[in-house]
Image (cartoon, rainbow, N blue to C red):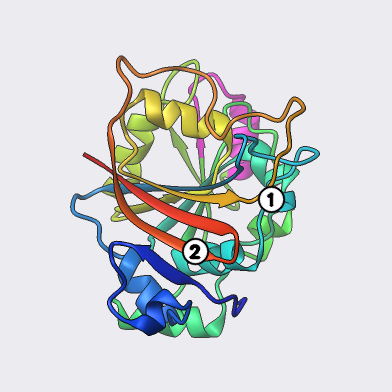
Amino acid sequence: MSDAAIGRLFPVPASDAAAQGALTDDELVALYDAPTRSPWVRVNFVSSVDGAATVQGLSAGLGDDADHRVFDLLRRLCDVVVVGAGTVRAEGYGPMRVDRAAQHARVAAGLAEQPVFAIVSAGLDLDPGSPIFTDAPVRPIVVTAGTSPQAKRDALGSVADVLVCGVDRVDTAAMVAALAERGLVRIHCEGGPHLFGDLIAAEAVDELCLTVSPSLVAGTASRIATGAMPTAPVGLELAHVLRSGDTLLLRYVRR
């Protein structure tokens, strides 16, 4: 895990050390570990100052050491990590596994040693022989729609639990309910933009953790959320602002 220094700008830092960027991992976890409802859906993204979600198609071009540090810590706090299949492929995801220190921290907090990995895919363009499945420390979940090919469902069913949520497309509200029924109530989504957009449209987002990268990208990069729209904009409340150099780490919660 990165040791990038992170300080707190808002609310008012509790100490001069916090203001100077000396927050420990435990202090950071305390700032992020405060769900008020169950289930609780947290979404984590990075964006450039001008709103780009990627550089040359990848979010990795925007994240720095501070973003990576918080990214890793957020996985300590959830029951399940949810990612769209397109993002899994584009960003080169492997098996969902946290390190030994994170395992100890999770167990001490009353969570399972490892989070479950849930991949959302309407068409099931996934390889059952991928290390994502064969090397997973915990049996993954695949969330799909009713129109997905039965043969692909059967093949993936040998290496993952397949949940059908929705008919023509994945119903994210049904997905949240299905995960909660399995006891996976701390739901952490790492993208991509279409999945985030669907969660917003379903009014299922409780929290957004947004890293603002000090860069201008322009071009045709997508936003962090695309696709369907909710009936009205979802109001958010600013919970905290952290800073590492010129990078801002924002946490918003649903009103």
- The residue where tag 1 is placed is 62
Q: Quadrant of residue 47?
A: top right
Q: Label 2 amino acid?
A: Arg
- Left or right: where 144 falls relative to 229: right
Q: Label 1 amino acid?
A: Leu
Give the x, y percent position of residue 97: 58, 69
**Closer to the camera in the image, 206 or 131:** 206
Give the x, y percent position of residue 203: 31, 29
Task: Give the residue displayed 46% in from the left and 80% down from the top.
Answer: 103
Question: Where is 83 relative to 15, above or below?
Answer: above
Label 2: which secondary element: strand
Dot 2 alpha-carbon crowd within 10 angstroms: few under 14, some 14 to 19, many 20 or more: many
Q: Are marks 2 and 1 in contact (CB under 8 Å)?
A: no
Question: Where is 64 relative to 129, above or below?
Answer: below
Question: Where is 37 relative to 203, above or below?
Answer: below
Asked if residue 92 lies in the magenta stretch, the reply is no
Q: Which contiguous range is marked in magenta? A: 143-156
Task: Give the residue displayed 48% in from the left and 22% down from the top.
Answer: 146
Dot 1 alpha-carbon crowd within 10 angstroms: few under 14, some 14 to 19, many 20 or more: many
